[in-house]
Image: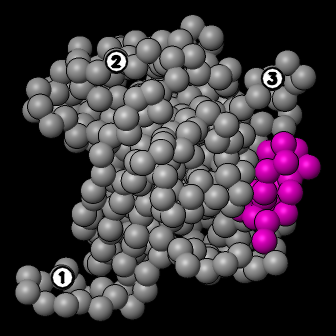
Amino acid sequence: MTTPDPIGGQPYRHTAGVDPLGTLRTPADPDCDVFLTGTVFLDIVFTGLDSAPAKGTETWARGMGSSPGGVANMATALARLGLRTSLAAAFGDDHYGEYCWDALEQGEGIDLSRSRTVPGWHSPVTVSMAFDGERTMVSHGHEAPPPEGSVPTCPPRARGAVASLVPGRSEEWVAQAARRRTRIFADVGWDETGRWDLAALPDLEHCEAFLPNAEEAVRYTRTDCPRAAARALADRVPLAVVTLGADGAYAVDGGTGETAEVPAIEVAALDPTGAGDVFVAGFLTGTLAGWPLADRLAFAGLTAALSVQEFGGSLSAPGWVEVAAWWQYVQGCSDQDPAALRRYGFLDALLPAPTRPWPLRRAVPTIGFRRSP
């Protein structure tokens, strides 16, 4: 069961009533903090595998969960950090689509007023098998037919928006949002064309921040290291953030010349699915809240680290409850470096009192069970 949040009517099973933008809100604010659009998948995650399935054999998994995936990973991560999140997406006209809609709207408090159920269209599905800290995925789906499958040409007023850039493609809503002073945060996927040409990302000119991973950044800038790539990207966007995997993240503010680097938190990674989405959500939250650059990097890295300790994409996205439990736990560990802990001291002014000890056992929802009264 979720409890209504007195601010905005959203559940705060994960947010614990924390509003990171609370001191900034005014009556003239837009209806939503963050807008995003994309494809929602039904993710079915098999866990507890000792190895990859072998050809010609049947493999039994010790655990299984299902949840909305695709763009829902990012939307869930944002909502659990207390941002009023609006998602425009097509949903399948089947039980999978109904389940994903209910999980996002009722379970996470995400605004789906700009989303649509498409008659006769089935939900895209991804089956993910997690083992040895990695995952193997098999997906199936078709593009939703227009007009339901198209993104809105006039997005809502929002403080921020997330755009996933695709080489050779321009989305009109991105330019529309930028003209309305929405702050655009962009990520990018692997360039299947192999050209790695920044000119093929025309929507980059509308973006405030660009957050590629190290390999993507190096390939796009033709540089020899991720830090040099970030500096080169800062000539194209106001803020360049390059994720360095196990080495953390590096950022360059193109306007001020400020740089920041924060090492990654060492954790036992079970499943990296959705960790990049969680990183972007954490960084976006800190940016909209006006935090210093290094604090934003640290918080984004922390939320991503917490997510890889759980299985699944949206299933693993942490909220303030999880962050508070981790912060209380880690401060009580005798083997922690005091200097490293000070890096996260800014959390003291933000976090609620922990309600449960670390580690938390998060629920793993799946299709088939009725909601308890």
Front residue (pair 7, 171): 171
Q: Which residue is mark 1?
A: 53
Q: Compare marks 2 and 1 and give the one earlier in the sequence.
A: 1
Measuring from the top left, give residue 320's x and y in whole percent: 71, 58
Query: Is residue 80 found inside the magenta-colored segment of the image?
Result: no
Q: Which residue is mark 3?
A: 29
Question: What residue sits 42% from the left and 34% below the top?
Answer: 149
Query: Is residue 2 found inside the magenta-colored segment of the image?
Result: yes
User: Compared to 244, does 140 lie above or below?
Assistant: below
Specify the quadrant that holds the N terminus: bottom right
Front residue (pair 45, 20): 45
Measuring from the top left, give residue 35's x and y in whole percent: 60, 32
Does any portion of residue 51 appear in the rendered image?
A: yes
Q: Compare marks 3 and 1 and give the one earlier in the sequence.
A: 3
**161 relative position to 62: left or right:** right
Q: Are marks 2 and 1 in contact (CB under 8 Å)?
A: no
Q: Amino acid at mark 3?
A: Asp
Q: Are marks 3 and 1 in contact (CB under 8 Å)?
A: no
**30 relative position to 152: left or right:** right
Q: Compare marks 3 and 2 and give the one earlier in the sequence.
A: 3
Question: What residue sits 40% from the left and 12% below the top?
Answer: 205
Range covered by the magenta-colored residues? 1-19
Q: Quadrant of residue 229?
A: top left
Question: What residue sits 59% from the left and 54% below the top?
Answer: 101
Q: Quadrant of residue 373?
A: bottom right
Q: Quadrant of residue 335?
A: bottom right
Q: Nearer the viewer, mark 3 or mark 2?
A: 2
Element type where label 2 sits in the image:
loop
Question: What residue sits 61% from the left and 76% below the top?
Answer: 362
Q: Which residue is mark 2?
A: 170
